[in-house]
Image (cartoon, helix red, strand yellow):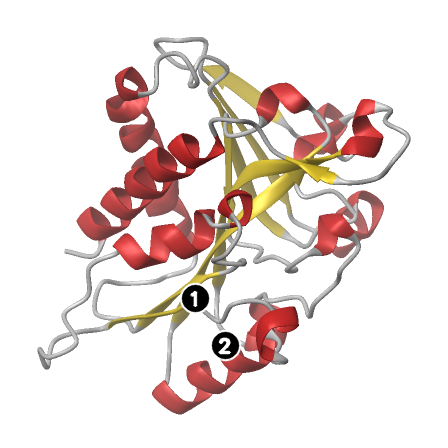
Amino acid sequence: MKDLIDESGYDLSIYGYETVELDRYDITCSKLFIDSDGKAEELGFDKGHYFIINAPLLSSLMNEHYDILFSEIKYRIEFLLKENNIKKRDKILFVGIGNPEIVADCFGVWSVNKIVIEPFKKKNRIFKIIPNTFANTGLNAYDVIRLIVEAFDISAVFLFDSLATDNISRLGCSIQFNDAGLTPGSAMNNFGMAINKSTINVPCFAVGVPMMISSKDLKAKKNIILTEKDAKEKVEFLSSLIADVIDELMQ
């Protein structure tokens, strides 16, 4: 299973996939709406709205990308919230998926760590957790999230995670977000339970950045997971960017 929908191997244009060019730095934003069980089964992705921002020059012009990426991500997430009838007064759980001990798998953890909450104020409607990985805790993220959603009457879940890609040039240069949720570890054939509206019973939004590539995609003899040398810098920048967007949306 692929993490990035535009790496599915299908001609997505026949399903309504569209790409628009943004103002600067060769940035593009693509979108696809999987609106039927038939499409979902054919593509191997859950139903929902998918957006992918590609920023091929991010490595060399990182700080220059901040404003345009902030604006575009905020606009698209606002759309997803509206489509799912989520309001600011609703209780929202932010979840950082991944292994905090591995930089390439830290995008979700760092993003959630940076999101501001006010737990001592009665008006606080924002909660966040970092469930870590099954290998480290013996607990599936799905089970932890489901229990919290039920116990605290959560209205929506945001999931942040590092993704895998089969194109080395996309490492840390793409951002995918959707209202279809995600399946932790799916691209590495280490499947957890799917976390989406069907399994959790509330809308589940996912934000992911490809930070890992399998050596088999580079035609290497041994199958190992690789990342790029500036992974830490990319994760730091992108997690801060995403957290800033969420903080502004939750005000």
Graded by Cα atoms within 10 Å as few (under 14), some (14 to 19) or many (20 or more), the crowding at tag 1 reads many
Which of marks 2 and 1 precedes in the sequence? 2
Label 2 sits on residue: 145
User: In this view of the protein, which residue sits in the foreground, 127 or 109?
Assistant: 109
Graded by Cα atoms within 10 Å as few (under 14), some (14 to 19) or many (20 or more), the crowding at tag 2 reads many
Residue drawn where x is 42% and y is 38% of the image: 235
> Circle 1 — which element?
strand
Locate residue 2, reporting x and y percent.
Answer: 74, 42
Label 1 sits on residue: 157
Amino acid type at mark 2: Ile
| Placement of 205 over or under 28, stated as above or below | below
In the image, 58: left or right of 246? Answer: right
Locate residue 82, reporting x and y percent.
Answer: 35, 53
Locate residue 199, reporting x and y percent.
Answer: 62, 74
Q: How many marks?
A: 2
Q: Quadrant of residue 233?
A: top left
Q: Are marks 1 and 2 in contact (CB under 8 Å)?
A: yes
Q: Nearer the viewer, mark 1 or mark 2?
A: 2
